[in-house]
Image (tube, rainbow, N blue to C red):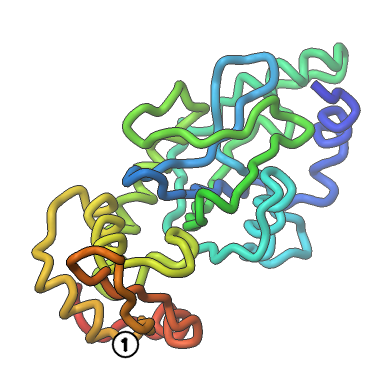
């Protein structure tokens, strides 16, 4: 563990950070028809956590979420969606910080600012798995992808935060597009349907799915190519970036 960084944070963090407010980012990736989540392993412990941190006193909370993600994973220019605020009184007991404070000998105080009750604001992001090379930061020893159905032991209420992010993402499929940064630049309609089915956890009717996705007018279809066999290859599509991000802000206008 980098004690200099930890000590500086614990001793001086209250001077630059807002008291009682934190950020936790849930980063989803899609690989081999499975949703994965990016987690950091706590130094010297077999316990994992979400990429999180604190909000500086003169910083917009959305900027804080992006900064924390960049510092803790190396990811930037990622669309982050704020989805929920977690404020249960019992969520704040952090044995990792207690251990670090005790290492400071006489400076340990159970009333230390870092041990007080924290409300955390959750953000989630969707990224293309193949384009991410996750790296741990100075206070973690690993940063890796994990299957949603095989999560390791998690810090505090981080498992509940992940499940809430998945729940909110499913709800937003009704009025927001999804897929950009999760799929390759070009994909088939079958690829896109597989993504939606994985997120929703259920099968969708192919014809109905195709009709609805095309009606949203966020896809550009490429010229159809032959596969070299007896049958034609399926159409390839790509997201129309301008229309896609407009739909993210204004909605699709109809339920999925």
Residue depicted at x 75% and y 30%: 139
Using the image as rendered, state which of residue 183 and residue 244 is in the foreground. 183
* Residue 140 as seen in the image, left or right of residue 188: right
In the displayed structure, 110 sits above or below 161; it is above
For mark 1, what is the residue? Answer: 217
The quarter in which the N terminus is drawn is top right
Residue 75 placed where, x, y %? 66, 53
Residue 42 placed where, x, y %? 64, 24
From where the camera sits, is residue 82 visible? no
The quadrant in which residue 162 appears is: top left
* Residue 181 as seen in the image, left or right of residue 204: right
The quarter in which the C terminus is drawn is bottom left
Residue 81 placed where, x, y %? 48, 63
Residue depicted at x 87% and y 39%: 12
Residue 21 placed where, x, y %? 62, 49
Circle 1 — which element?
loop
Residue depicted at x 40% and y 28%: 151
* Residue 19 as seen in the image, left or right of residue 205: right
From where the camera sits, is residue 50 visible? yes
């Amino acid at each position: 563990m980098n004690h200099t960084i930890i000590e500086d944070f614990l001793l001086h963090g209250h001077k630059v950070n807002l008291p009682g407010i934190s950020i936790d980012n849930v980063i989803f990736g899609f690989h081999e028809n499975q949703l994965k989540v990016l987690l950091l392993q706590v130094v010297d412990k077999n316990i994992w956590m979400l990429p999180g941190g604190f909000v500086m006193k003169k910083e917009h909370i959305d900027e804080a979420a992006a900064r924390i993600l960049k510092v803790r994973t190396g990811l930037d220019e990622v669309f982050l969606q704020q989805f929920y605020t977690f404020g249960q009184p019992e969520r704040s007991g952090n044995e990792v910080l207690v251990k670090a404070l005790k290492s400071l000998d006489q400076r340990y105080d159970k009333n230390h600012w870092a041990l007080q009750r924290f409300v955390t604001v959750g953000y989630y992001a969707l990224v293309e798995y193949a384009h991410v090379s996750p790296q741990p930061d100075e206070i973690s020893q690993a940063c890796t992808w994990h299957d949603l159905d095989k999560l390791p032991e998690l810090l505090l209420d981080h498992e509940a935060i992940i499940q809430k992010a998945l729940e909110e993402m499913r709800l937003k499929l009704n009025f927001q597009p999804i897929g950009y940064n999760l799929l390759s630049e070009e994909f088939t309609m079958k690829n896109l349907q597989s993504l939606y089915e994985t997120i929703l956890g259920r099968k969708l009717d192919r014809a109905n799915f195709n009709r609805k996705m095309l009606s949203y007018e966020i896809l550009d279809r490429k010229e159809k190519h032959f596969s070299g066999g007896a049958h034609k290859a399926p159409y390839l599509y790509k997201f129309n970036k301008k229309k896609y991000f407009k739909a993210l802000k204004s909605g699709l206008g109809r339920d999925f």
